[in-house]
Amino acid sequence: MSKKFLPIMLALTVASFFVAFQTNGKQSGGGDNPKSKNEKILRNIGLLLEQGHYSPKTINDAFSKEVLNRFEKELDEDKTIFLQSDIDSFKVYETRIDDEIHGTASLESFYHIADAYTRRLNQASEFYTPLLAKPFDFSKDEKIQLDSDKMQYPATDADRKEAWRKRLKYLVLTRYADALDDREKNKGKKDFVFKADSTLERESRDQVRKQIGRFFTTLKTHNTSDELFSTFVNSITSEMDPHTDYFPPVDARSFNESISGSFFGIGAQLKEDDSKIKIASLVTGGPAWKGGELQVNDEILKIAEGKGEPVDVSGYAVSDAVKLIRGAQKGTEVRLTVRKVDGTIKVISLLRDQIKLDDTFAKSAIINGEHKVGYIYLPEFYVDFERPNGARCSQDVAKEIEKLKAENVEGIIMDLRGNGGGSLPEVVKMVGLFIPDGPVCQVKSRDEKPYPYKDLDKSVLYNGPLMVMVDENSASASEIFAAAIQDYKRGIIIGSSSTYGKGTVQRNIPLNPESEGGMFSSTEKEEDLGTVKLTLQKFYRISGGATQLKGVTPDIVIPDRFEYLKSREKDNPSALSWDGIEKADYTPWTSNYSYDAVVKAANGQISSSNSLNQFKQDIQWLNTENDKEYSLNLAQFKDETKKVKDVYKQLDSLSKPAKDLDVKNIVADTTNFSADKEKSEKNKQFLTRIKGDMYIDESVKVIDNMIAQSNLAATKVEQQ
């Protein structure tokens, strides 16, 4: 942490104490009063943002207006809850929210908007049942707009009800059209039961009724006052930049669990089944599996923390139920009230234990073909800060490399597609597995000179041909890794037109440091106000340019089916800008193959590929189809849907290699899978995914060229 930020932490402590003292002096109940607590959170966040953020925006009237717009959109993105009159009434807060953040005005905006939202949500939830009670007429020539940016808030209740009518009609139409297609495909088959059009239409309405009923129940259950306030606060933090977030205490714990790759729980995966929360599977060796009382398809009715009052989870989202089951400490009790498959009700007591998220850990395989190639998949740069012996991705990847070297692979493909990042120190160590000592990236704090993050280990674990796979969802630490490998010319990067473009560093900072024994701590336990994941730094490539906004452009670009969704950093209006600094002092890697020749050959092959060019055309066509109104006329809808389905079918075909890749497990791993049925099934899915992946197939073709050139160079050296 920057030394210049330490006074800010002290200032936060002082401000926290002052706000707590001020509110305690003015209101009975002090910290127990929700409004007092929310004002304290708001003011502490304002202080953090203005004094600690890497590039803070001025919290003024203009900022206030943007926060209001963002909060309205977060609550009602589809514009089916609020009326225009509500939006108009909120305008009084356009220039007030900044004053509420600074503490010069009492907090009113949130309560007014949240109350209006809750009231309008309850009203909207009354529409769907009568609207779905009668058949829809799909012969009418009607259209629906689903792009909220092109929609207006309804002016009256009648307009809002009409908007819901069209939305429900569209949902029923999609199911009804599919039911008609299924009837056509299956007629004549043994045991086929023919259903009339009217029956299929009614069943489609029944399905939508259940879906929307579940939607409203979950929305009402989830959107408590605390959850709505979290949304309000995140509208403020996200206006500063997309990666500064506020986490209430339970969400902060969930974030830390995602980074560490483990958590304390009972080892049961949940699912939603017909609006009920049920057990989907049990983790072998976990508390639920060992206990033997909890079974797959048991329905969870209530969840209690130890001897505490059970929480009825009817209508809960699975994610909210999971938060109740997981805990912060090993050995703590959770009691589940479940309805068994036979209908009996039972209370099951379990003690939490550490559960490892194996799906987030590095795994590898061997691809046999022209050459023997090692493949490593890393879904995120994980590290367990809380446990010294916890999982660390750099150590796990090193182990996978050692196993691949023992199998005599001639090249390695590192797959970072979809890897959203994680620990910066871990990525530095991981780059160090492939290069001698040297800088990996440069980091700049607010008002300070940039400094390099260096690999200090002179040894190189693997020095053979290397490829790195990325896509538009490879972000943050993934981009640091890809950029360093590219700048050193240590390997070749392949993927979509660019990576995500997140070039900022965040740190979790508690909003009430006094509760952790700070300057103003007391013997009375303070209520946890939550945590802010604050953008404190920006990182740069060793070549000088930021990965922020622009991301990393691969050496070899392959068309990607999600290319045109506009979901990268550059598509977010609040994203920080791109800039550059001086390059670091580093020495590029010397390969025994021609880097430029391999890249040129691969790009030439891709540009001349008929299948990849068709793939690109199909993606562009689908992008234009997504930007239009949809017909509610059955005949026209079926015609439009058929065209889209045909293109998707063609894309699926083009996404597969001409023939499946020959993929095998590393011999050292086979014993792990044979003893565990669940792991064995996941392993089969892992291998199947690799076999039919066009992008991996293209990567193998490129690394085959790298290996061939390396082998030729080695042969020439031996002959000299």
Image: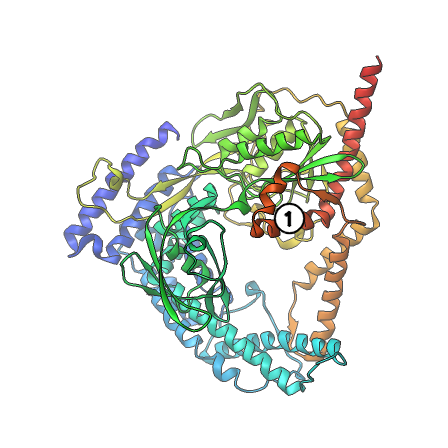
Left or right, 351 with respect to 299, comes to left
Left or right, 382 with respect to 682, comes to left
The x and y percentages for residue 630 are 65, 71
- What residue is pinned by disc 1? 686
The x and y percentages for residue 202 are 59, 84
The x and y percentages for residue 235 are 42, 53
Query: Does the rendering let one see residue 628?
Result: yes
Residue 66 location, quadrant:
bottom left
Position of 653 relative to 663 (above/below): below
* Total count of labels: 1
Left or right, 301 with respect to 689, comes to left
> Which residue type does callout 1 highlight?
Phe
Query: Does the rendering let one see residue 246?
Result: no
Please state which of residues 712 and 628 is positioned toward the viewer in this rendering: 712
Position of 1 relative to 637 (above/below): above
Please state which of residues 506 and 664 is positioned toward the viewer in this rendering: 664
Q: Residue at x 53, y 45 (%)?
A: 358
Q: Where, quadrant-wise, is the C terminus in this rendering? A: top right
Question: Element at badge 1?
Answer: helix
Position of 249 relative to 504 (above/below): below
Pointer 1: residues within 10 angstroms few (<14), some, or many (20+)? Answer: some
The x and y percentages for residue 360 are 54, 45
Q: Residue at x 75, y 22 (%)?
A: 592
Q: Residue at x 58, y 34 (%)?
A: 397
Position of 381 relative to 718 (above/below): below
Q: Where, quadrant-wise, is the N terminus in this rendering? A: top left
Please state which of residues 619 and 426 is positioned toward the viewer in this rendering: 426
